[in-house]
């Protein structure tokens, strides 16, 4: 599963390079007495940073009432919101709410804030919907498969995998809504929100920008992206779907116009290694304890980043036939899947929206 605090080497999604807005249309003069508005050329303003273990990009355009310094201060507020949530939900700080829950596993419930509680609660809902293949208690296998800073290109022993799997069970995560507590029933259990919290952070940052009066922007946190509005010339933002066996993050096989929606991608090409002709990657199927083999990449289009981020791993693990039904059950949700045999699957809601440029590249 995706880790909250890992810096992705390259974003799974790439906004198309055609970001420069077209020049304003010339206005016709009704009479010589009416003054023409001064020409205005919108300028793109982008802030890049690191948070939640990944690369953050927040971008918008200047307007007649908001210049670059004004917008940059607003973009900084959005990133600050992501950082605030990170402090609550990371597993890399002993004082985070999630670390305190893990420390108390098998001992006692822990009171958490409303935001952490919401993410845990919705994570359990996704777990139930996905037959348990999305499970935040996967953190118990943290030191077995090493794809992060401690990367080791080795396959764990079956004995070690079986021992870790015994601690994975979302049904043993007990929440109390009235008391706002989270309790891990079994000692040794651990949870991580790395597979869903980035989407929550992106949505929270989008709310900050909307409250600041911005009506056109995008926010990207690694493979999670949210787009609000359109570019100044009225055209939609175009998003590329990465070729999982392509040349890099800007090599995409499909495109989609996105407005007021989110994209999230899960792929086996990040945090992986190839050994003995087989690819080993970080999206682990909790049913087996080994990397999922049904898909190469899954890109989810949804009304918000939290929804998209919450189901992309589940679809990846279940595979296109079972996984796409999850999207069909959700409002305003669709997906593009490249399966293990390099076949492209497109859900019904995206059939008329997605532009397939070519077949994805084949390979291990």
Image: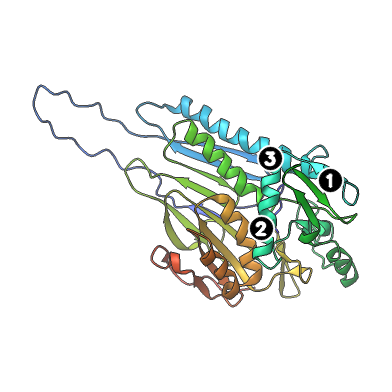
Provide residue 74's location: percent of width, then percent of height.
51, 30
The residue indicated by pointer 1 is 109
- Tag 2: Cα neighbours inside 10 Å, few (<14), some, or many (≥20)? some
* Relative side of 7 to 346, left or right: right
Measure the C-alpha gap from mark 3 to mark 2. 16 Å
Local SS, label 3: helix
* Relative side of 362 to 258, left or right: right
Quadrant including the N terminus? bottom right
Q: Is residue 34 above or below residue 187?
A: above
Which one is nearer the viewer's eye here, 284 or 334? 334
Q: Point out which mark residue 114 bears.
A: 3
Q: Quadrant of residue 48?
A: top right
Q: Quadrant of residue 292?
A: bottom right
Which one is nearer the viewer's eye here, 128 or 278? 128
Q: Point out which mark residue 125 bears.
A: 2
Which one is nearer the viewer's eye here, 171 or 343? 171
Provide residue 269's location: percent of width, then percent of height.
64, 63
Q: Is residue 175 above or below residue 290?
A: above
Q: Quadrant of residue 23?
A: top left
């Amino acid at each position: 599963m995706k880790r909250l605090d890992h810096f992705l080497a390259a974003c799974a999604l790439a906004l198309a390079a055609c970001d420069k807005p077209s020049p304003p249309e010339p206005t016709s003069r009704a009479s010589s007495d009416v003054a023409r508005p001064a020409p205005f050329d919108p300028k793109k303003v982008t802030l890049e940073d690191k948070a939640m273990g990944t690369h953050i990009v927040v971008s918008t355009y200047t307007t007649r009432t908001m210049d670059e310094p004004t917008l940059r201060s607003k973009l900084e507020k959005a990133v600050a919101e992501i950082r605030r949530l990170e402090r609550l939900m990371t597993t890399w700080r002993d004082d985070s709410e999630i670390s305190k829950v893990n420390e108390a596993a098998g001992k006692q419930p822990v009171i958490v804030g409303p935001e952490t509680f919401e993410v845990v609660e919705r994570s359990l809902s996704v777990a139930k919907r996905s037959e348990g293949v999305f499970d935040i208690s996967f953190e118990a296998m943290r030191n077995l498969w090493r794809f992060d800073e401690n990367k080791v290109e080795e396959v764990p022993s079956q004995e070690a995998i079986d021992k870790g799997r015994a601690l994975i069970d979302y049904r043993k995560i007990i929440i109390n809504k009235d008391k706002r507590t989270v309790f891990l029933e079994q000692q040794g259990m651990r949870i991580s929100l790395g597979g869903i919290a980035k989407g929550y952070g992106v949505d929270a940052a989008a709310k900050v920008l909307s409250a600041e009066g911005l009506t056109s922007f995008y926010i990207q946190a690694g493979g999670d992206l949210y787009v609000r509005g359109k570019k100044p010339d009225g055209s939609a933002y175009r998003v590329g779907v990465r070729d999982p066996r392509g040349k890099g993050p800007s090599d995409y096989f499909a495109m989609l116009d996105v407005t007021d929606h989110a994209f999230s991608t899960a792929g086996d090409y990040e945090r992986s290694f190839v050994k003995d002709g087989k690819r080993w990657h970080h999206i682990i199927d909790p049913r087996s304890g080994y990397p999922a083999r049904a898909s190469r990449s899954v890109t989810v289009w949804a009304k918000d980043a939290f929804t998209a981020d919450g189901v992309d791993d589940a679809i990846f693990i279940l595979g296109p036939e079972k996984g796409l039904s999850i999207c069909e059950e959700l409002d305003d949700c669709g997906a593009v899947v490249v399966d293990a045999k390099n076949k492209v699957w497109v859900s019904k809601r995206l059939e008329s929206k997605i532009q397939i440029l070519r077949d994805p590249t084949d390979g291990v």
